Amino acid sequence: MAKTEIKTKATDATVAGYIASLPEARRREEAPVIDAIHRRVTGLEPRMWGPSIIGYGSYNYRYDSGHSGTMCRAGFSPRKAAITLYVMMDYGDRQAEAGALFAQLGKHRTSKACLYVTKLADVDLEVLERIVALSWDVMNARYPT
C-alpha cells in the first residue's frame, strides 16, 4: 500500500497575515484572543499548519495502522461556523478534571479531538485557558519528544 502524503504541514505563511485575511470580522477579533491564550500556555510563537490551522509546537505520532506524521501539539482554526480548538479529549487519569472544566466552560461542542466554540462571548475564557493548559500538559506527557 502506498504511503498517503500528510496534507497538514507547517508552512511559511504568517499567522498575522492569515488572521487579517479572515472574511468574518468576529473571527478577526476572536483569533488574537485565542492566540494569546495559546502563547501564555505554551510559551511558543505560532506557525501556520496547512492553510487554516494556527499551531504551537509539534510532535511525531504513529498509529497502530503504521500511519505516522508530524502535527502541532496545540492549535486552533478560526473557521466560519465555529472556532475549532485542537485539544486532547482522552485525558487519562485527569479525565475527571477535564470533565469538570468542560462543565464550567459554557456553550460548546466537542468531537474526538476538537473543541468547537461558536462565539467567545459564550464561554468562560479563564476556563478555556485551563482546558488548553490541561490538554498541553497531557499532550506533553503522552508525547515527550
Image (cartoon, rainbow, N blue to C red):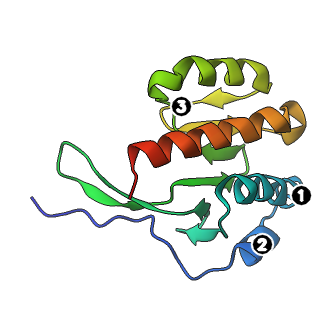
Determine the image quadrant of residue 109: top right
Q: Residue at x 72, y 60 (%)?
A: 39
Residue 119 figure quarter: top right
The mark closer to the camera, 1 or 2, is 1
Q: Which is more N-terminal, label 3 or label 1?
A: 1
Q: Residue at x 65, y 45 (%)?
A: 84
**Left or right of residue 112: residue 136:** right
Disc number for residue 21? 2
Name the side, left or right, on which 120 lies relative to 143.
Answer: right
Kindly identify the amino acid type of the residue bearing the numbered disc 3: Ser
- The dot on residue 29 is 1
Q: Which of these two is toward me, 28 or 113? A: 113
Mark 2 or mark 3: which comes first in sequence? 2
In percent of width and height, residue 72 lies at 50, 59
Residue that mark 3 sits on: 111
Percent x, y for residue 11?
53, 77
Q: As shown in the figure, which amino acid type bears the numbered disc 2?
A: Ser
